[in-house]
Image: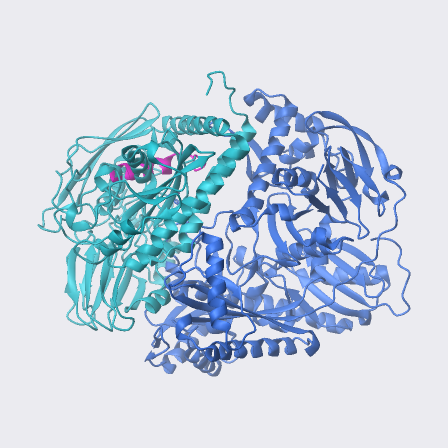
Amino acid sequence: MPDTAPALDPVTFEVLRNAVLNATEEMALTVRRAAYSTNIKTRADFSCAFFDTKLRCIAQSFAQPSHLVAMATITPNAVREYGEARFGPGDAILVNDPHRGSSHLNDITCIAPVHLDGQCIGYLANMAHHVDVGGASPASLGLNRELFQEGIIIPPTRIATGGSIDDNLLGLLLANVRAPRETNGDLRAQLSANFVGAARLSGLARRYGAATLAQFFDALIAHTERWTARDLAALPNGSWTAETFRDDDGFSDQPVRLRARVTIADGRISLDLTGSAPQLASPLNCTRTMAACALAFVARCLVSPDISINSGFLARIAVIGPDGLCCTAQRPAPVVGGWEMAQKLTELIWLALHPALPDRVPASGKALIVNLGFGGEDPRRGGYYCYMETIAGGGGARPDRDGPTAVQTNLHNTENAPIEEVEMNYPIRIVRYGLIEGSGGRGRFRGGLGVRRDFEFPDAACSFTIFSDGRRFAPWGLDGGGPGACARYVLDPDGAARELPSKVTVMVPKGGRVSVQTPGGGGFGDPARRDPAAAADDARNRYL
Amino acid sequence: MDAQPARHPHPLYRIGVDIGGTFTDVVVVEEHSGVVQVVKVPTTPADPSQGFLDGLAAAFARFAITPQQVVFAVHGTTIATNTIIEGQGAAAGLITSAGFSDVLEIAYQTRPSLYDIFYDKPRPLVPRWRCIGVPERIAADGAVLTPLDEAAVAAAACRLRDQGAEAIAVAFLHAYRDPTHERRAAAVIAAAVPGLPVVLSSDVCPEYREYPRTSTTVVNAVLVPKVGPYIARLEQRLAALGLGSGLHLMTSSGGIIAAATARALPVHLVESGPAAGVIGAAFVAGRLARPDLGARILALDIGGTTAKVALVDNGVPALADSFEVGAAARPTTTNGRGQGYPVKTPVISLVEIGAGGGSIARIDPGGALTIGPDSAGAVPGPACYGKGGERPTLTDANLVLGRLDPAFFLGGALPLDPARADAAIDRAVARPLGLSVVAAAQAIVEIANARMIAALEFISVQRGIDPRDYALVPSGGAGPLHAVAVAAALGLATVIVPPTPGLNSALGLLASDVKHDLVRTLYRRTGDLSPAALWSALDEMAASGLRLLADNGVPPERRELRLEAELCYVGQSYPLTLPVPAERDGVLAALDAAFRASHRQKYGFASPTEPTLIANLRVSAIGRVDRPAPAAGRPGSGAAAALKGWRNVCFDQPTDTPVYDRARLGTGDRIAGPAIIEQMDTTTVLPAGATATVDASGSIVIDLRR
């Protein structure tokens, strides 16, 4: 583009901003409607994005905050490694390697180029959490020591050429997973979404010209970065430190230290993880990309809600500190449970900022994903089934109001699976699903309540994996507010009631039950100052 | 339309009453002559039925109508939606399966607003202390795992009554599969607390997925004690007047139902108001001398705060199977679910965006020009109203560009101040961007148009529909200001400006059929079903539908059934809806093949071998109602006769532009752009290259093909 190109006029800018975002939204609709697995079609555990030829993230559909940085990191890495020149129209690649900049193996990213008249004008990517990618236990969830035990590792690999799928590669992938029919359907949904997005974007390029589009990308990123910098600069500048712990790595009962130094200066926000525990031989590790998601989430909450999410926003965010920590893990560390680390890290960043932003920081929420994965023989339908879900909990109380009850918090925003849909499709029964009374931390503003969901296996035994945390260190309150209740995981809750660790795979016998009880949020402010009307409402509704 | 009627010796009248936020519109159509007449009276928010009766009395007096001459009366109302939005629903109780009474508190477990730490889920419509679980459980296959504990139901009902419940909702797990427990519970409750309304999930929404079903049931339960008496009161007062017909109400899906049905199922009235507007647009377009021009339309309603778009094929609006009441307008559907209360009933598919005449233009902190979603509303209103509004709005931009006449806004009822519009745009947009005021106003209008174009693409292109096959029908005060520019950008050939764009809703009430939508979850693999089993389910539903039509007084020769099945691949959750072919034996194979073809068209791939599943069956029972036949307009005597004068209007360039008076235009009159056509309730902007012709039906048909 010539240096003398005029600045983009405001109308074209606004039109293209809406159009590109609409295209990623349309991709998201396609993934959701065409997908097969409950985790994607119902729980919406996926995101879609568009990148320009400089591999900058231009637009992202709203879905999972946890994918915010992950896609913006793995997509450029994968495209460069695979080689831009090798992409033809209708081609697509897959990648899921955490140590190439992705999150965990279950998150498979599908990337396709967008062409106009044979010229590449950008890339579409969508990342979706697959129910199973092989490995040691159902849902690829388990307490392992190496990444290799967690499932099939996919480097940037071509899955489609000129619009047709490579059945050899697909066959290899499907042979390695426990729910091949679902995986097959979900991959097709991902490919479809990219085709839909490519049609929309090449249409835009035809209408406005590739040069105008490229000019728009520059303008958009500059606009976003300018605005982000402005909003960050308006926050108190300084450096603040905080420390917390995860319960254990699953192999020992040693707490795992997390330390964060958060700095806001010069219109930037950074997170220094120096002082956190070294890398673990446990899937509680998270990668630097996942840690960056935690920081990006908090930053996104602190700036104007109207700021677009693209590389201009991400340019103002940095995770520093050495590699090889439990939150900057390197190959061959296992990472399937890394979001449990990243969720706690998010709370820790909030905690560090509390002295600087006392009116904007909430008490700690559940600080968990609560990964549940299980599977086994399905005697009624025949064959093997595999299922995963995550359970909501309490949100932390805010400086001016109670915490939200029964929500996903921070990085995580997947829907629940309807009981009726689950029971129609899998040999399981939900026998209880409700709030845990008294689980919210006390305070002038009460923490949100945690949730109890009990599973029964009426037809056959099942391998049940919990990969979570939060049994020992409770969600903290702030300004005198009390902590939320801890998590509990109980085998045979209505009988022997055996407490399970938070990271475990157990065989549940036919007819057996598992109860999952998630933490409540911490309270905010002195409980003695609670409004009597709110206290009466708590009592009447048995929230406390 | 307002020509003096040549009175029929025995006139009969149809009456449509649409209660809006400000005005209650009464539209009267004489059956033989088709003459349409209108009365507007102020809406009476405290008791809307008062405004209804005031309007009726005014219409009767002005047009010398006796109540006995009324053969048909239809009402469109926002009472259901307002009751929910304003938190005025009745105190309801909820009885669920034991262990699951927190279904409303948990909802979808998500945050619709991802990055707002201060976000709260909507407060459950029934508080936790009035939600009670009772022992009972039915499995997914219909097997009874735990029999219903009737004593517990009776105790729960008594407790809820003692706690002040005015209605009881019952929603048991898998009740869509087997309603026996719910029906038994209803009987037990009726015996324990006689007279308390009971609402069953298996009656209101017999579809799987417990949260949306329970929510729909509860919305109905909180409405029954509020909306039921309102409708009953209207019925009584109309009967006391001696009205010659019963009362019908418009539903969210654009059909009408008898008052008695509406009293029991007010949840179907939630989107009654917007539905009537879309039906009205379709009706107007369908009456053109060349029916093909208006067979497929995109309806664009631009109000003060938002714009709404909908798509209509051959008079049938595109429908969605659910929506949320109380949720903010937003065009995205993949996320943001959970902002309001889910209602799973058929609804005219509308996309609403925050861009209307009062939407505020500003420079965002990153330096880009944006419009809305915040609006100056009616107070303080746009800067040019001179009522204290300081910020520039879309209306200010249209005024600066000369598209609005400052002395003829609302027929001159509200004089506008161009200097204030100029100053506001200069301060907030032009100077920061280094543009002239006119260029800034142009940018504001173009960005507003772009948002409307995006909304129109959202309901067409994104569903695989080419908008160029459609005509645009604008309504609302600002609709015809923007319609031609929006249509041109989308590549449409035709814009149809209704005779009175402000009356679409009231007119729509008289242009619809009686319609009852029934649904049943089947959720069986196509391969496991026999044609006999499918037909037995469909025949049963059809019989219920026909019974409802009979109850609504629809004569047999006017009854019609539409049968549909929702299919997906085993494992998918978002089925595609297909018409059920009338083949007794080959029905399953035909449905299966139609599904695969449709899947390929929609998603770009389709497996020929993977098993399919029939999720839900849907039956629409339709009672055909004759459309009114409005009288033809008077013939024109050439557009020149309607020329009011000339003024400077800015299109691409400032242009000396003729201004026409719509009231003086007649059938066949033709105007070539650039031109402005003014009428009491709107202004139509006709750029160069577009040609407007007055149709015999009174609409203006604008041809954009050069």
The image position of residue B415, as x and y in percent, is 75, 35
Classify residue B555 as left or right of residue A223: right
Is residue A292 a member of the stretch shown in magenta?
Answer: yes
Which of the chains is cyan?
A
Give how far across and how far down residue A476 sits, in percent. 24, 46
**Chain B: what color?**
blue
Q: Is residue B115 visible?
A: no
Looking at the picture, how far across and down is residue A192, in whole percent?
A: 41, 49
Q: Quadrant of residue B547?
A: bottom right
Furthest-top residue in this view: A4
Q: What color scheme is it?
A: by chain
Q: Nearer the viewer, residue A165 or B633?
A: A165
> Residue at position x 81%, y 43% from top?
B662
In the image, B241: left or right of B196? right
Q: Which residues are magenta?
A: A290-307
Q: Is residue B466 shown above or below A220?
A: below
Q: Is residue B612 visible?
A: yes
Residue A196 in percent (x, y) is at 45, 45
Q: Magenta region, mostly helix, strand or loop?
A: helix
**Closer to the camera in the image, B387 or A391:** A391
Q: Is residue B449 left or right of residue A132?
A: right
Which residue occupies the foreground of this view, A498 or B178?
B178
